[in-house]
Image: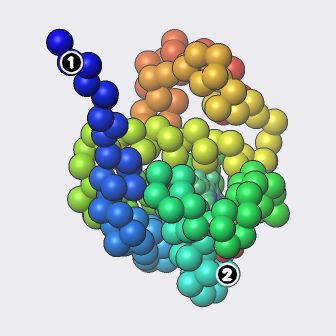
Amino acid sequence: MTEQAATPGPTPYESLGGETGVRSLVDRFYDVMDLEPAYAGIRSMHPPSLDGSRDKLFWFLSGWLGGPPIYAEKIGHPMLRARHLPFPIGVDERDQWLKCMSQAMDEEGVEPALQRSLSEAFLGTADWMRNKGRARHLRRMMVRGSPGPWDLATANPPSDPARRAATCNLLKC
Ligand code: HEM
């Protein structure tokens, strides 16, 4: 019997279509943010021109999704939480960001299974950016065991009242 080395599956970067696909997702994300009144809150935190924001998010996501680490090469360590401290980010802002990204993924036709896993990863990262209000971070909860199931489409806590109460009590959301 011959031993076969497990072939690693494609990275999310590859599944999204590499550089073209990731750039297109980022462009759609900022187009949606710019156009939809639902995201006006987070749009107003960004500079009038979104060109620089588009580049930086693309560079970051490229490495984060398993492609070339462009952000690290051009700028250095992302230190994302520290870089977001100048902007007041609470539950509303986090959810606007996540819904905007979900809409962008839908419009880009990202495959549902990939959308689910990316939404979960984005939720952990976006929640970690929260710096407004007294709140415990989902990321810490995830390390100890997920309080889930969160509604990944809306990034809301579970709809079941008992689970919701338990989760919100933990997260102070
Ligand atoms: C939680 C809600 C979030 C809000 C309200 C938010 C808002 C912002 C704002 C206002 C900027 C500055 C834009 C600029 O200077 O052009 C920024 C930068 C950035 N954001 Fe976010 N962001 C959020 C979540 C995220 C998440 C989840 C990611 C990654 C998955 C991310 C990645 C970045 C990157 C890479 C930058 C550029 C950092 C730099 O080099 O200055 N952000 N964000």
**Residue 173, disc:** none
On screen, residue 129 versus residue 120, left or right, reads: right
Identified by mark 2, the residue type is Pro
Q: Please provide percent x and percent y for residue 149.
A: 45, 23
Q: Please provide percent x and percent y for residue 69.
A: 57, 61
Foreground pick, 1 / 154? 1
Q: Is residue 18 above or below residue 44?
A: above
Residue lying at 48% horizontally and 73% vertically, measured from the top left: 30
Residue lying at 25% horizontally and 44% vertically, measured from the top left: 112
Give the residue number, with chain letter if any, for mark 1: 2
The answer as to whether callout 1 falls within 8 Å of ligand 1 is no
Q: Quadrant of residue 23?
A: bottom left
Calculate the distance from the C-alpha at mark 2 to the C-alpha at mark 1.
58 Å
Q: Please provide percent x and percent y for residue 88.
A: 76, 57
Q: Please, which colouring scheme is shown?
A: rainbow
Q: Is residue 37 visible?
A: no
Q: Nearer the viewer, mark 2 or mark 1?
A: 1
Residue lying at 34% horizontally and 37% vertically, measured from the top left: 8
Q: For the residue labelled by badge 1, is the local secondary structure a helix, a strand or a loop?
A: loop
Q: For the N terminus, give its image quadrant.
A: top left
Q: Quadrant of residue 6?
A: top left
| Callouts 2 and 1 close, C-beta under 8 Å | no
The answer as to whether callout 2 falls within 8 Å of ligand 1 is yes
Give the residue number, with chain letter if any, for mark 2: 47
